[in-house]
Amino acid sequence: MLCNFDIIFSKTIDNEEVNYGIIEGNNTVLFIKAGQDGSMYGYQNKYLTIANNINKNYGYTVICSSNPLRKSNPLEQAIKVIEDYCKQKEFEDYKIYYMGLSNGGYIGATYAHLYPQIKRMLLINMPIFTNWHKIKKGLNQFNGEKAILVYGTLDPSYKYAEMITMIKRDNIKLEIIENADHNFVGRLDDFIALPSKYLIPK
């Protein structure tokens, strides 16, 4: 049975309301950023399902965030939310694993390097072409353990995905999923399995 978030709240930034849902766990935090205008639950509760699975199987804290349109750095507020939560839980040391779909992936690629707490990233079907210079700059400055960029072969950005291999860094990897479109329509189970497959240390 799917359990709802333990904590749900909203914060306003740039006159937009950002919603957060938290499933409480240990000092490893999986932070999930939805795609543009996406909810913290995701289509058919896909983010809530991931949160339940990761918490149950690995004990992680999972924080999911909606993604209204913003011009400033969307991660600044999220990192503060994570910091406040970890302080409340008296986690003296914590690390963040980041997962983002589409624009959520772009946000991770361009801003995560500013936050050394972010150790791993899973960026799924991130738009490449129009913002390649920002993506390349951000990933070149990311010093975490690894960033896995996943593209479905039916995603519009798949034809540009090979550009990722131009970033010659050992911690940046490209993975291709055959016959998956932008939102993994008809392949929800495969989408839900992505963080366990690519993000969680083995």
Image (cartoon, helix red, strand yellow):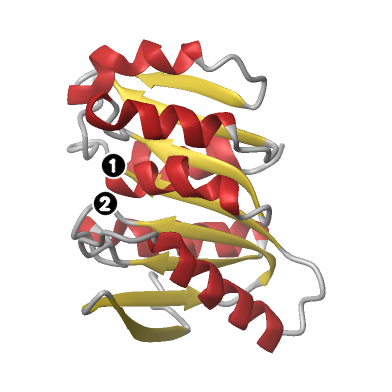
The residue closer to the viewer here, 23 or 155, is 155
- The residue positioned 63% from the left and 34% from the top of the image is 146
The image quarter in which residue 66 lies: bottom left
Proximity of marks 2 and 1: CB atoms separated by less than 8 Å: yes
| Dot label at residue 141 | none
| Dot label at residue 102 | 1
Q: Which structural element holds mark 2?
A: loop
- Dot 2, how many residues are within 10 Å of its Cα: few (below 14), some (14-19), or many (20+)? many
Q: Position of residue 93 (x, y in %)?
A: 80, 68
Q: Which structural element holds mark 1?
A: loop
Q: Is residue 28 above or below residue 164?
A: below
Specify whether 27 is left or right of 53. right
- Dot 1, how many residues are within 10 Å of its Cα: few (below 14), some (14-19), or many (20+)? many
Q: CA distance from mark 2 to mark 1?
A: 5 Å
Q: Position of residue 22 (x, y in %)?
A: 48, 76
Question: Is residue 92 visible in this depiction of the protein?
Answer: yes
Residue type for callout 2: Gly
Q: Position of residue 60 (x, y in %)?
A: 63, 63
- The residue positioned 41% from the left and 28% from the top of the image is 150
Q: Is residue 86 above or below residue 159?
A: below
- The residue positioned 17% from the left and 24% from the top of the image is 156
User: For the C terminus, which image quadrant?
Assistant: top right
The residue closer to the viewer here, 38 or 114, is 114
| Dot label at residue 35 | 2
Upstream in sequence: badge 2 or badge 1: 2
User: For the N terminus, which image quadrant?
Assistant: bottom left
Residue type for callout 1: Ser
